[in-house]
Image: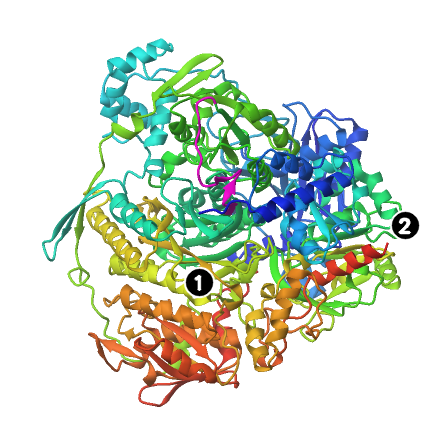
Amino acid sequence: MASEPTASKAEGEAESRAQSRVQSGVQSEAESRVESRAQGRAESRAENRMQSTPQSTMQSMAPDTQSVRALVLGGYGINCDLETEYAFHCAGARADRVHINDLIGGRVTLRDYHILALIGGFAWADDHGAGVILATKLRHHLGDAILEFVAAGSFVIGICNGFQALANLGLLPGFTPGTFRREVALTYNDCGNFRNQWVHLKIEESPCVFTAGLSALDLPIRHGEGKFIAGPDVLARLQGGRQIVMRYAKTNGEPAQGAFPWNPNGSLEDIAGICDPSGRIFGLMPHPEAFNHPTNHPDWSRRKWTASRRATTRARQGAAQDARQGVQQDLPHGAARGAPQGSLGSAQQVDGVVGQDGIALFRNVVEAAKRI
Amino acid sequence: MPARLEIALKPELFDAEGAAVARKARDYFGCPVGDVRTVRVLTIDARLSQDFLERVRNEIFTNPVTEVSSFAPLQFDADWVIWVGLLPGVKDAPGETAREAIEDLLGTSLPEREACYTSRLYFVRGEPSAAGAAAASAPVGVCTAAERAVLTAADLERIARELLANDLVQRSKIWRVARGGQTRQGGATAAGQPGPGPSEASMEAAPSGKPRAGTPSWNPETGVGIIIPRVELRHQPRVSEIPIGSDAELLTISAERHLFLDPRDVPAIREYFLRPDVRRARQRVGLDLPTDVEIEYIAQARSDHCNHNTFRGLFRYHDLATGERVVIDSLFRTCIQAPTLAIAAKKDWVISVLWDNAGVGRFDDDHFYTITGETHNSPSNMEAYGGSLTGIVGVYRDPLGTGKGSRLICGTYGYCVGPRDYRGPLRPRMHPRRLLDGVVEGVRDGGNKSGIPTLFGTLFFDESYLGKCLVYVTALGLMPATVSGERSDRKRTRPGDLVVVCGGRVGKDGIHGVTASSHIYSESTPAGHVQIGDPYTQKKMHDFLVAARDRDLIRFITDCGGGGLSSAVGESARFAGGVEVDLDSVPLKYDGLDQWEIWISESQERMVVAVDPEEVDAFIELSRRHAVESAVIGRYTDSGFVHLKYKGEGCAQIALDFFESDFPQWEFEAEWIPPAQRGLNEPVLSEPEDHHRCLLAMLARPNIASREWIQRQYDHEVQGGSVVKPLTGITQDIPSDAAVLRPVLDSSRGLAVTQAIHPTYGTIDTYHMTAVTIDEAVRRVIAVGGDPEHIGGIDNFCWPEIRHDPARNPDGKYKAAQLVRSCLAMKRACLTMGIPLLSGKDSMYVDGNLAGPFGERHRISGLPALQFTTVSLVPNIDRCTTLDPKQSGEIVYLLGATRDELGGSEYYQMHGRTGCNVPTVDHQDAFAMYRDLAGAIDAELVSAVHGIYRGGLGVHLAWMAMAGGLGLEIELARVPCLANGDEAVLRNDVVLYSESGGRFLVTVPRNRTRALEARLAGHPISAIGRVVDHQRLVVKGIPGTGIIDVPIETLWRAWKQPFGHLI
């Protein structure tokens, strides 16, 4: 039978209500939920966490809930909100899932947040180009608020559909801060279809705060329009300003140089992600939030068995725990390994455990946000 | 003044969509197409200023980095131009989002009549001709028109008709690009006619009818013209009375209105309306004779699709060999309900079965999961993309409408189609290649755009599915165990609750979908039921309803599926005891729908919710914030009637208990002829001399070969909980036994999901087909780490018509016996292994009438098929196993006995034979072994686990070798074999390709072999070889000589060869 809400959960609710009052006076969706719960409509803790309730989610995960807040924008066909919220939690931030209409309608204000996350999905079904209508909507209704948010030194991450929106909005590459100008585009994959595939990424030297200290990463891509395009001048400027954050790479970790499927979409210069000149606005096509646990990695089972021979089971288990607790991993960095479709690799290449996970990007920005 | 905006990629950019069209035109039809450029056309039928239109063009619809656009026709160098647009009334989701975007920029809504419509232009050029290529030795772009191959009008019509447009939902036009500057207005070609009722408002004279001899010339000044597929029904809605003077009269009306009423139901229907008490009650609300609303409603509710008349029928089963006779009163009650209730009583994880839209199981203390399966065969057969899209989006509404509503967490698919390279004489509506492309893409867009991972799938090619394809879709959801302290699986409507409909609007689309799917496909099947689902609208509704559930605003929820409002409202009214609906309150896409159409239309993306009147304002306000349309359309009552009104006038009143009591049970004669009596026997076939080439040939069989291209298009990692992916191994393309997901991100529990289907075994005996299919579905979840005590099943039957007719269906009695045997096997399997049937579905008319080469028509019945889906709890995802051997030195064990069971196997099929020794399994013994294997997996004694399925040991050793990228050395002499229950020595090809059930391959680190053997003591297991690192598959035959020694890369190339070029 279903368990009744426990005393500790009730305490959690009381505490979170208190937090809500501390925050801005606007009536957020989250707060109205708290009210409805105060009327005796308690829900199960876990499902609660999945339903945009900052108050309940944070109890165990973020020791310092007052410090860093992330706004995960949802609605209109956007769809990676739950796992992005979870990734921020793992990284020690408090994340709220907020419907675009609540932001436009003023129920929630950007000023209360350190980080804005535009995430994966099919906003307005991507019918007229991926991220196109989302960008129009944001510029039209929230343009000033977003510029103010950025000018205040806050952080923006755009993942997949969110990256497409940032490019269409013109926040990226953001050569001229304070303006919206479209300079780059993410267009239809050269392979002609939507693709879900893991890629190896080479992390370049850049001012991007999200990738500080990282040199390589494996992540999944899931898109039909991820081919990065820009004119030669813009590309040169991106290169000169070290705004190219990550490139699709081959198994050996070197850029794919356009080779499919390592470069899965035909992106120019193998570009998978770029940042603005400040490094605080970051867009990428791969999904870091989908690598929030070691078992997300396609090779985890094989590496578990090969790792056990080297008596590194502890590290593997540690990785599992770390991902949940948002603690910086001290694991040896796994080089990009495993061969994607198109070639047969050799199992002997596979050793060590799954490398750095996608939570690392969230951890970095949360740490950076704490410093401001 | 309407405006037409044309948008295209800049000429210097690669046009991937155009390139795909060009490639398919060359590969499929041999048309010498060089390249194709696509242009998106957006026709804006609204009064907007030129300045504002320019803003619309620049700020919304044109990406300055990649695109060019214009309100005048765009031009690309071309020899031909094709335009493809939707017929009036067909769902144009991109048109609707374009309207949303324009309204947002405008800051106000456009008037109802104004709208946006999307369509496409294709600029087609011929390949460089030999002369052109020699002269230029360069790509098409450099050739002049004279240097290009000549594309004929017939080529273009074929491309338009068989590649770009489906005349059920689209129309196309073709122009020849004249060099002399001739200008002539475009004419319609390959145009379908609008469905009954809708007409078209067009700014141009649109000549319709047959293609003319001369194709019109392209006029670069006017381009495609302005085409507005607006539906205008100049029709005043009215209710008509249906005369019921005699059974014959009602049957005639049934035929005229495509109601497909069963003749046995007709007397009961007439009797009801002639009953004195019914007449008195009707007179009180101003009704007399039955109305068209009522008769249409009854036809929906009584259809086999909604009512499962076949499964609830009386079967007289007669075994012609033994003389045994059995009468089974309702297969549903006997083989589904009874065993499931018996098992549910013993398994406390079974929360809710057999009544709601989906079955409910416990995930953990705080969460329930919901699961159901559906088929969408008939619509997919007619419009592959729209049909499968509507199918998957539709099945998602079942978990959403289960209990108080669950959030969707997973979808799966299964397709049975004709051979992709079919070149035979029959002419199906769509070639299987196009049909498969379409259904694959429909499920892709349905799943991906809903943000729901598509985790697993099956694909089976067989010529019998040329008549009608099978499209299976399955969905899982998750909900909190309680909502406001009450169990979330419990719900009811109460008198006084309001009836609220949420989501999409109602149009003519989807009228008579249910009755048509309960019928055999023929040219006279009304096409009006073909729909195109809209995952965007539904995703918004889904998010809204989950939020409303969490605020406890939902008393009851159910989906508008087959039968539309009639089914959803009618069934929900049973709890309260009645309902009153104002049909004029239902939001419509356009005016002019008759009352009966509003009541039964299957327009998609709608849910019906019962809301407390006290909370309706909060519900509607939340709906508005989520940009979802919700409307109150009535109120639940305790009157005992479904009472419908339109603008205050009564138009229907049906007693709620009418559908439950008064209809005769369907009856079927079932005659079983055992395989030997049907003349089946084992083929006389000697062992191959070249086992190496034989294995490679098996790997390249379409039903064995890699279908990576399908799964790769499906987002299977959204929601962030992927644990075992559908494809695995070092090349990430070997199919996993099952997929595992972590639906609650901070939990270490998982759900394993998989499915199995084996139609060819049924050509021998559907009893064993079913037994082995269910066994396989069970082994698949066990292989990845599922809990054997927590396995739920979903049965999806697709069967040809089983009613005997001497002329039309001469083997109907045999097909009925096949169904009985399948159900009996399922009952036994489920009871033996403790598998409750959490949900299921039957689709009973998998037949088609196909045109042959001489104008004759062939009735083609699909092989009877049971797709069995299993879901299992994974207690600890860290213990999940995959099929790839992990490191050299590990020992390969085979669990389970191999028998001479090649009947219906892939091996016999390769040789064009069927055989008689159908694969079998003893569930009792096998399941005892599965329990012990599950213990071994949990104890981490095995590093890789893989079941042996279609293709047998040889194929599945090859899959494991490819997945691990290492190497395997196997001795067939060590394989445990049985003949007549005794140990036996079987021939090499039998050992390699027999498809006996109940078997696994596992790899075990050397230091754990003893522990494994101890754990599996008493079961038929044997170490048959070891994992090595030479990257070859080496098989020693009996007696001890090497018969296969092949590099893994060679295996992989053979296995990839059939479909490896597809992306």
Which of these two is toward me, B830 or B56?
B830
Between the residue at mark 2 and the residue at mark 1, the CA separation in whole angstroms equals 55 Å
Chain under callout 1: B
Q: Are marks 2 and 1 in contact (CB under 8 Å)?
A: no
Outermost residue to the bottom:
B1040
B452 or B255: nearer the eye? Answer: B452
Q: Is residue B699 visible?
A: no
Q: Residue at x 36, y 36 (%)?
A: B306
Q: Is residue B495 magenta?
A: yes
| Horizontal arrangement in the rendering, residue A5 relative to residue B315 (left or right) | right
Q: Position of residue B784 (x, y in %)?
A: 46, 66
Secondary structure predominantly adopted by residues drawn in magenta: loop
Residue located 24% across and 81% down the image: B984
For label 1, the residue is B786
Q: Quadrant of the N terminus of chain B?
A: top right
Between B697 and B552, the one nearer to me in the picture: B552
Pointer 2 and pointer 1 on the same chain? no
Per the rendering, the mark at residue A358 is none
Q: Residues within 10 Å of mark 1 (few under 14, many from 20)?
A: many
Segment colored magenta: B478-496
Q: Is residue A272 above or below residue B85?
A: below
In x, y percent, where is residue B65?
79, 50
Instruction: Quickly name the residue at label 2.
Output: A176
**Which of the 4 image quarters holds residue B925?**
bottom left
Question: Could you tell me residue A44's position as x and y percent?
Answer: 55, 45
The image quarter containing residue B1016 is bottom left
| Relative to B76, B793 lies left or right | left
* Amino acid type of the residue that numbered disc 2 sits on in the rendered structure: Thr
Q: Is residue B562 left or right of residue A361?
A: left
